[in-house]
Amino acid sequence: MYAVVYIAAFVATLTVPFVVVDTQRRTDADAWTFAFASHANATHGALVLFNAINVLICAWEIALWVHRERVKKLHVGFVKKFGDRVSDTARRARDGLNALIGIGAGLID
């Protein structure tokens, strides 16, 4: 549950200030809070939200790259505990894709 709160806070931290500043820039500085709903730019808000989510995904990817040895150890532990079902599923999906596009099986190994 904490992860959801942290993600929401992270995205809001990267979204809300830019939308507020953009709205302040386009309205009267004294009465901007009352005009926020009518002057907020939905396109700008959507783009800022999209960028905030992309920053979050990049942070996750960087964390996975930094901790890749730990991820490998976890993967080995999961294979020992649950078997190699994931690899078999991925292998079947790859072979099915190769057959679908007409490439001989085993070219993408």
Image: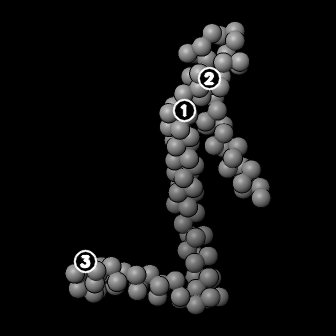
- Callout 1: 10 Å neighbours few (<14), some, many (20+)? few
- Callout 3: 10 Å neighbours few (<14), some, many (20+)? few
| Mark 2 or mark 3, earlier in chain | 2
Residue on which disc 3 sits: 101
Identify the secondary structure beneath mark 3: helix
Location of the N terminus (image quadrant):
bottom right
Location of the C terminus (image quadrant):
bottom left
Identify the secondary structure beneath mark 2: helix
Residue sticking out furthest to the right: 1
Mark toward the viewer: 3 or 1: 1
Q: Mark on residue 42? A: 1
The mark tally for this picture is 3
Q: Specify whether residue 55 is in view.
A: no
Identify the secondary structure beneath mark 1: helix
- Looking at the rendered structure, the kind of residue marked 2 is Ser
Mark toward the viewer: 1 or 2: 2
C-alpha separation, residue under disc 2 versus residue under disc 3 = 51 Å
Residue on which disc 2 sits: 38
Say whether residue 72 is left or right of residue 91. Answer: right
- Looking at the rendered structure, the kind of residue marked 3 is Ile
Q: Specify whether residue 6 is in view.
A: yes
Residue shown at the point (69%, 12%) measured from the top left: 31
